[in-house]
Amino acid sequence: MALDISVSDPEKHGTSAVNAFIDFKIHTSTTNPGFASHDFFVRRRYRDFVWLRGQLCVTCPAGIVPPLPAVDSLVKDDRFSKAFIQRRQAGLELFLRRVAASKMLTNSPELRTFLEAKVWELQTVKNASSSSWFSSIFDGTDTSFKRIQLSFRQKVPDESEVERLRVFAREYEAVVSTAASKHHAFVRTLSDIAADLGQLGPALDMLSQSETELSLPFTHMASSLDRLKELHVHRVQAEHVSGLSALLAFNAGMASALKEVLSNRDASLIQYQRAAGSVESRAIERQRFLEAQEAAGPAVKRGGMLGTFDHLMHDPNRASKIDAKVAEAERELAAAKERWEAISGSIHTEAAAFHRNTNADFSRGLREHALSQIEFQEAQQLEWKELLEVFRRIETVPCGTSSSS
């Protein structure tokens, strides 16, 4: 069932620097009968996306939840600037499109609420949202997983395929993060070149005023350098919106999300083991109680102070209380077993989808990157070729010849 989501039409609300915010139009087109309509839209702000991702991480611990666009960037500009808004809009749309590509995540009630609910309805749901069993013991980070390991001192057994996936996720995150860092350095160089061109152009314009015979060439060159500066600025912005820089950053986040799912698997197994241990301890408690009752024989009622003491020391409802504890422990075990099997059973499917989507992303992204670089280089060459024609028309005086001869 098709689910196509786009993010567009950013609008600013408020005037103060503290309370102002940007929201976006989220347009959905779908054939999924689970939605109330086939074509609809809502408006959402960044914090709504943060809520959605948090809910997906909690309710779909087996799903690889895509990352949101990072708040920081190599391009330091105002969060209400056009460039910043373009980067955020592109990142939010990429997040939703990847969510829509996941069968597991698209079945989430929270996603439907995010896409369909009115603003006040969404806020009501957000207010009612509370941390689940999973978020209380695990927040999806390596730090929290280490905390769990230290708490229970248990080694989580791994099947060989999961162990290979764990190694891949760790190594892939390191490699793609390194690539992102190196490409960021390249983009930073483009940004520095743009800044230098912005200073060189005016300097040459000033020089044209002192060399009257070369005034026209210097003026042309100053104008060309200004256009070259704009080309570099545009290239830098494009890299952060949909270029290789944005693609590498997104896939670094996807690698981290894959590691989160593996950690979720470990945490759910630990929870399962704890629940099994709790059932065992409750069963032992009940067995000992029954054995003690059998050994004590029929209860003898005593009067006076001794009878009062017996009543205080022996709870007549203790048996039913123990049975209730056993039943509760068994329910928790059943729920923990279901969670563990759901995560463990789907992790390989999620990993396969991760590889397919990653390959598709890079196949498309690298082609687009090559084409954009060709276009960028051709635009620069055009500027220099036009400038060269100006330089060729400069009249020169041969060396050793007087200008009056």
Image (tube, helix red, strand yellow):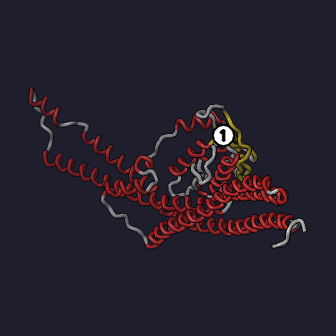
Residue pictured at 47% horizontal, 62% vertical: 262
Q: Is residue 274 left or right of residue 199?
A: left
Depth order, front residue of 200/47: 200
Residue 113 visible: no
Determine which quarter of the picture holds residue 373: bottom right
Label 1: few (<14), some (14–19) or many (≥20) C-alpha neighbours in 10 Å: some
| Residue 139, image x, y percentages | 45, 50
User: Could you tell me the amino acid type at mark 1?
Assistant: Ile
Above/below status of 33 relative to 316: below
Residue 152 image point, x, y percent: 31, 56
Q: Name the residue at the right extreme.
A: 405
Q: On the rendered structure, is 70 left or right of 313? A: right
Looking at the picture, how far across and down is residue 206, in whole percent?
75, 52
Work out whether residue 262 or residue 279 is closer to the camera in this orientation and state it.
Answer: 262
Marks counted in the figure total 1
**Observer-nearest of 312 and 354:** 354
Q: Is residue 6 visible?
A: yes
User: Mark 1 sits on what residue?
Assistant: 22
The extreme top residue here reads 304
Give the position of the C terminus as an image quadrant.
bottom right
- Element on which disc 1 rests: strand
Q: Is residue 168 left or right of residue 19?
A: left
Residue at image location 55% in from the left, 50% down from the top: 56
Residue at the (64%, 58%) spot, across then down: 192
| Image spot of residue 64 (x, y percent) | 55, 58
Q: Nearer the viewer, residue 306 or 248?
A: 248
Q: Residue at x 82, y 73 (%)?
A: 400
Q: Quadrant of the N terminus?
A: bottom right
